[in-house]
Image: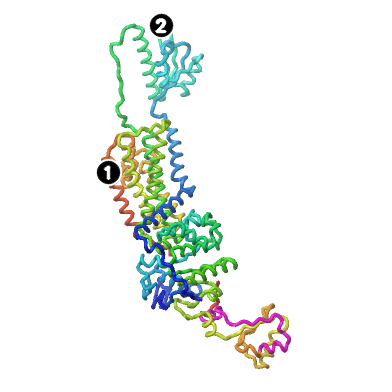
Amino acid sequence: MTEAISADGIRKRYGDVQAVDGVSLSVATGEFYGILGPNGAGKTTTLEILEGIREPDEGRVELLGLAPWPRNTALLPRIGVQFQASAFFVKLTARETIRTFASFYGIGPKRADAMLERVGLTDSAGVLTDKMSGGQAQRLSIACALVHDPELVFLDEPTPGLDPQARRNLWDLLRDINAEGRTVVLTTHYLDEAEVLCDRVSVMDHGKVLKTGTPAALVREIDDTVRVGVESGQLTAARARELFAAAGAEITGLEDDGATLSLSTRLPAPVLSVLAEQNALRGLEVRGATLEDVFLQLTGREYRA
Amino acid sequence: MSTTSTPVRRPESGSESAGTERVSAFAGLTRVMLLGFVRDRGALFFVLLMPLMFLLMFGALFKNTGAPHVKVAEVGQVRVLDSVQGDGRAELEKVLTISRADDEKSALEKLRKGDLDGVLSEGADGTVNLRYSATDQVKAGSVQGIVNSLVQDANQAASGKAPVFTLVPSQVEDESLKPIQYLTPGLLGWAIATGAVYGASFTLVSWRKKRVLRRLRLAPVSPGTVVGARVAVSLAIALAQTAIFLAVATTPFFGLKLTGNWWLVVPLVLCATIAFMSIGLVTGAAAKSEEAANGINQMIILPMSFLGGAFIPLDGAPGWLTTVSHFLPLRYLVTSAQAVLSRGGGVMDVLPSMGGLLAFSAVMCAIAWRFFNWDDA
């Protein structure tokens, strides 16, 4: 597979802060690639360097075989960048906005209107952008990034503040975009989003890439801990501890928050049989590790959504 | 998950020439800026309505200060007045308002209060008594002159001979400014300065703040196209302001008479607009928010308007103020526009100003370039 993006050892310093500290990554053509990391991890700066908005202090970047810095007008029509939803011209309607963006690429109003329809905004085409709902503005923002039919699309936090239904609609749209053969690079606050959408993800912190791989491989690799939970009140935490020790069931954590007695273990079988013997299986939940656990283990901190 | 079954279509634009894209981007940006201006009621008010309201207000206020008009009361019958009839009477009433008073005492009371400028009565033997107040020297002089000429005319007519001497008065080009002659270019200059400074600075600040500048940077649009579109829109707005102002000022009510090469105001306005825009570029590059830009702009425009002669004529201004005004672009617009609009000025009255305005713009653009930032970050 050819590379849509290749970055090698990029670094960027702002004053005392080393925002990006030697990031290398490679994204294949047609891939859906996610960059995860807590706030301040250097995701946005990395993305900006990839897009060609910022010049790295060190390192080399190529998009579609071309250097994005300095500003390369031959490359620009081939990439699409989605911004925060508020980055629109003032006092324009949705239709006027997307037609304006289309005009920058020499694209006529018909194609612009078709893109508006694709993101389901035909009915709101006459609404001023500052009167649109969060979900509508996000979709318009994505439509503006796609109006010139780019090969490579960058999405920076596309779904914050959306209701679950709007998020799911947006995910469908993003999957379709990718299925058409476009390479998509996404930064997100939401791990479920990365798990659902991305072929591969990189976890970043302190300006470095900590780990890269498919979501499934990352989960398998870091942890085979299973989380088990049952309804509280069937077994006290102290009694459970005794019973597990007696049965030789190793547990790594045990907690009763008043609603759920939850524990984690690498060997779920003896734990479950103890719970079954005690007839304490009401409300049983067994769950494997998620990207959230990967994240926690790699960065040592909770993911702040 | 990743499929490459559908090949990515290349943008159609790829086959079009860069020229077409530039035209399309220029048209798109021009439209955005025009719509942004027309839909912004506040901008419309400050750039068009408020200056027009000032013109209406000051124009109506100062309208009659130029022509002396005196009011007299006629007590009893005064033959020299009553004998003037027909066309002569209409001509007389242009300069003299004549009212009748039955009671001399109350008429004199009015004269003392300043409600009348003269009280006329006829005594025995054809004596014409004129009482006047010396409070207003001009009116006192006028009323004496007018009544005196009436008496002379009546005497001459009574002699039954043809007049030996006849006075033929003719007016030379009036060198003193009439209010409408300085109000029009002054308030127009203020309006154009407001529109151009705000247009440039708000576009810059709000596009940077809303990250539209970054978006433009990631589109294949050249900075020249963006700047060109902004300049074109501001020039169009300035020309519209000029057209509306001249249309209003030349109505019979205001009575501005355009003379000679008045059209020279068009290139002058274009150069001045560019100069004002360059000020807006500096404030827009320096200010972090619309509010800050608003404050800085007003701090520049208002003093510049007063010191540059937009509200008050600079003719009688003290020396230091004249010196200060030479550094203000608005002064060059206002004085040159005064010269060409109604005082018969020619090319040489505007060319040096236009050169100066463009030089000023070049300096300001260089400063703006130093401060310019694509992002707030």
The verdict on residue A245 being magenta is no
Q: Left or right: A71 with respect to A245?
A: left
Name which residue lies at 27% across and 40% down.
Answer: B347
Name which residue lies at 39% across and 66% down.
Answer: A76
Chain ID at mark 2: B
Chain ID at mark 1: B
* Residue B125: image tag: 2
Name which residue lies at 36% across and 71% down.
Answer: A67
The verdict on residue A282 being magenta is yes
How far across and how far down the image is residue B199, in percent? Answer: 41, 51
How far across and how far down the image is residue B315, in percent? Answer: 33, 37
How far across and how far down the image is residue B15, in percent? Answer: 37, 63
Question: Which SS class for mark 1?
Answer: helix
- The image's colouring method is rainbow
Task: Tell me whether marks 2 and 1 sit on the same chain.
Answer: yes
* Residue B65: image tag: none
Q: Residues within 10 Å of mark 2 (few under 14, many from 20)?
A: few
How far across and how far down the image is residue B218, in percent? Answer: 40, 64
Vertical arrangement, residue A215 with respect to residue B308, above or below: below
- In this view of the protein, can residue B30 be seen by the observer? yes
Q: Amino acid at mark 2?
A: Asp
Q: Which residues are magenta?
A: A271-298
Question: In front: A150, or B118?
Answer: A150
